[in-house]
Amino acid sequence: MRIDEFVENCAGLNSSMSLSYEDLAPSFKFSNTGRRGTKYFSITLKQALHALRDIRNNLAQFSQNANYDEDSWRDLFPRHLTDDVTIALSTVQTLPLFSVLSKIISVSNNLEAGYNDKVMPLEPQFLDQAILYLESQLPNNEAYLAAVSSDSTTAEDRVSSGINKIYYGAPGTGKSYTIDQQTNAGHTFRTVFHPDTQYSDFIGSLKPAMVDGVISYSFRPGCFTDAIVHAVTHPEAECALVIEEINRAAAAAAFGEIFQLLDRDISKASKYPIHVSDPDWLEYLNSKTEGFFADGKLFIPSNLSILATMNSSDQAVMPLDTAFKRRWEFEYLPFDYDNAAQGTLPLALYYNGEVQVKHVQWSDFSKVINNILAVDHIPEDKLLGHRFLDDAELNENGANSLKGKLFMYLWDDVLRHGQRDVVFANTVTELGEDVELTTYGRLITAYDDNQCVLVEHLSEMLFQMTIEREEQQ
């Protein structure tokens, strides 16, 4: 019995106290100051990594407290850390935990000179480097469990982790990112649905190929078949099939008869297997799985999850029918401006009769724009997710991202039906004369000339927010 299974059995005993297996990881052993007797504590590498990620994700709350203050950090840690063990430690050994995290950041960034136990380097680049270093040191838990296993993996030992889940929300709310954080790249298969996606694309079909000058036909698998084969041949792994934009195709038609496989039993495998009527498909499946489907019945293994993304509100192109939807769990991803991409957009803003170029925080811009669009009854799936622009787009060339992506999206997609004046100015100046802002080309030309292209009240609001941020720095 593997140790993770052993712990699971222990956890099944009648007890009011919980018990769970934690992935293999080295640990940091550290002490208190020893003024009233030295005591020792430890956190694992994984727990330290989670703590630094939590600080990075909530940097606005932590950055004002780089110098240690017990009351402040005893409040910050429990409110923003996500690991229960670390939270418990932080409430009674706050300074030792603060110190060990500070040491990790300092050494991973070569900041040893002048180190102080009561000062934590909280600059974003220092946190990012520390996180990258710890991530590079994570051991392979799967390999460890495989090495200590006394028995070879049987069908009964297959991981039971499979779910069907659709993540939905506005563009840029982190749907794909959320899935990426929950899956293992080595055991994940991805596809993107589009209006022309068919059953044969998703499952596979016979395709011609030239072999030694002769045309022959063989089964060419689709993404679903590849995922099934991989999950069957890797029973110890949590595998995933990821479908981006599932509602851009007629999903029920793309799934065809495998629609029935989405019902799962208590083991997380398909509750109702189907008979494979296509002999070429069945032959391919058995050739790749050593006859796993020899009885001709296909099911989704318990270790294969099917995860999908879709836009919310009007469900974009193709609505999902009720029978299809009830076989999925749904998770809504809201706007989260506290975790918005970090960076600014250069904008000429009108305020008190003058135009000045300001670098507007992306989180401020997206939040204000969304509020204005929502008041004008723009559907939620047209609003700007907090990750609509990423860190690289903002920091490498914010102006190009603004013109080539953001303005284009607002002008052509969101406000194309006569509502552009809720965001954009009615007139701009060309050759010293006021002209109507009627084309996208005119919009970009005016922006390049450092003219204010936003409606006046929006411009003034962004100007004021930017000034307030500058005064706080």
Image (tube, helix red, strand yellow):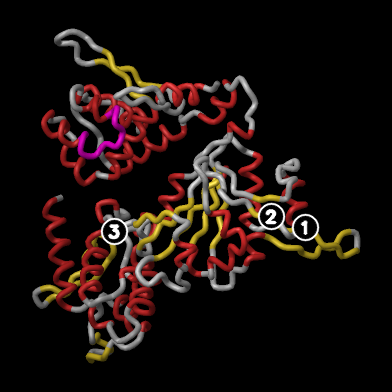
Magenta-drawn stretch contains 422:
no
- Return the disc, 2 or 1, that comes first in the chain's sequence: 2
Q: Which residue lies at the image location 35% right of the left edge and 64% below the top edge?
A: 170
Q: Is residue 452 visible?
A: no
Q: Which is in the foreground here, disc 2 or disc 1?
A: 2
Q: Please indicate whether residue 2 sits to the left or right of residue 372 in the image.
A: right
Disc 2 target residue = 275
> Could you tell me the amino acid type at mark 2?
His
Residue drawn at x 32%, y 66% is 384
Q: Which residue is mark 1?
A: 280
**Mark 3 or mark 1, earlier in chain:** 1
Highlighted magenta segment, given as a residue range:
77-86
| Distance between mark 2 and mark 1 Cα atoms | 13 Å
Residue lying furthest left = 352
Q: Amino acid at mark 1?
A: Asp
Queried whether the magenta region covers residue 84, the answer comes back as yes
Q: Amino acid at mark 3?
A: Phe
Q: Give the number of the mark in front: 3 or 2.
A: 2
**Is residue 330 shown above or below 23?**
below
- Residue 208 appearing in the image: yes
The chief SS type of the magenta part is helix
Q: Residues within 10 Å of mark 2 (few under 14, many from 20)?
A: some
Q: CA distance from mark 3 to mark 2?
A: 43 Å
The image quarter in which residue 460 lies:
bottom left
Percent x, y for residue 338? 25, 52
Q: Residues within 10 Å of mark 1 (few under 14, many from 20)?
A: some
Q: Is residue 321 left or right of residue 350?
A: right
Name the residue carrying label 3: 335
